[in-house]
Amino acid sequence: MKSKKWILFSLFLMLFLLPVKAEAATVAKIGTKKYSSIRKAVSSAKSGQTIKITKNSKWTIRRLETQEIIRKKITMDLCGHTITLHSPDNITGNMNLTRSSLTIKNGTLTDGGKGTFTFQVKEKSKLILNNLKINITDSYFNAADKGSSITVKKVKMTHKAGPNAAFYLRTGATGVFSGGTFITYGNLISNYGGNVTIKGGSYSYPKSSASTSMISNGRTTDLNGKTWNGKMTVSGGTFRSDEYIIISNNIGADLKISGKALLAGTYPLMSQGTFTMTGGKIHAKTNTVTYYGRPAVDSSSAPKGCTVTLSGGTLISDGNAAVIISSSTKYKNTGAVLKPAAGYAGMIRN
């Protein structure tokens, strides 16, 4: 009898003394339900729900993995915390939106890991970035078809000198930038065949190791052979660059500048497409980096069919003509003020 009791008591002690597996830390909640990873929370969220981030954490997508949000409307409230967009392997990790809407707000996004973390917005999906700090080098946001959109408002972004633009718009996708502060050391917005509207904000391009433009606008051809011309409207905002082109409006693209938009730098605008200005100011400045003065609008290398139409605004050059255009460019000025440097004409045909 004693032997049986001793065996039972020994078993009880063994069970009691076994190490208890620690519960995984909660990083996100949906209602009262807790999740130990952002990936799990995103996969579990139903349409209309809000994911609340409860601590600084990583959003990890591993090698050859893709996370999908399909036919859902989801909000992710960072609640003041930081999410590290984490691709631990030397390959891209994709967060795909398909016929869905994702709003990310109220916190910080930064990137980390060996690979690139991308948001792919497709098939009439919407990505909304609101009230965020974004610090990225390799990661980027991409919308690639008609009906899909990226909306950016109240964002403070530092985009370091990585290989990618921070925002890609393609083949009919829409991008809307309503305000914020953006510091970039490379291409900030790459629009080829999309439709971009910039309504306000502060955009600075201190220097670049890539010798590229802050904003590029151009055309592309999709897999079906259809040509998409990039369209861009800049109705507000302040854009400054110490070295390279602020806006490169390439062949086939359409650029409109209006309102109180200000482009100020050593090379504010290169246009080889269609350019219209109804308001705002473009100021070509000189400094030690620039070996000769630039015009406010440079269309000197534009091909046949390129147009420059000015009906308002002010164009200033500290070291050249206000406008230089090619011999084949169609040019019309009905109301813009041209202020060239001393000794130069307002407009010069190249």
Image (cartoon, rainbow, N blue to C red):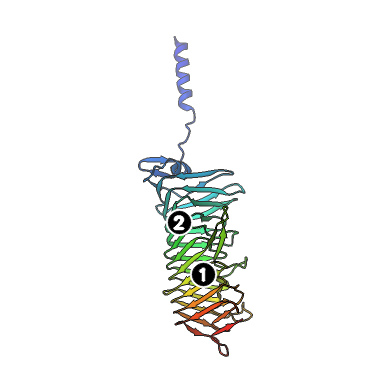
* Location of residue 31 by image quarter: top left
Q: Residue furthest bottom?
A: 343
Q: Give the number of the mark in front: 2 or 1.
A: 2
Q: Which of the pair 48/2 is nearer the observer?
A: 48
Name the spot of residue 132 as percent of width and height, x first.
43, 58
Q: Specify the label residue 204 is tagged with.
A: 1
Q: Which residue is pictured at 42% across the width and 75% down the height? A: 260
Give the answer, above or below, for where 44 lies relative to 239: above
> Residue at the spot x=51%, y=69% of the render?
204
Q: Earlier in the sequence, mark 2 or mark 1?
A: 2
Residue 320 horizontal/vertical position (percent): 58, 84
Quarter the N terminus occupies: top left
Q: Are marks 2 and 1 in contact (CB under 8 Å)?
A: no
Residue 213 horizontal/vertical position (percent): 57, 68
Residue 8 is left or right of residue 307, and the answer is: left
Give SS at disc 2. Answer: strand
Q: Is the residue 14 above or below the residue 287 in the image? A: above
Q: Quadrant of the C terminus?
A: bottom right
**SS label for mark 1:** strand
Residue type, label 1: Ser
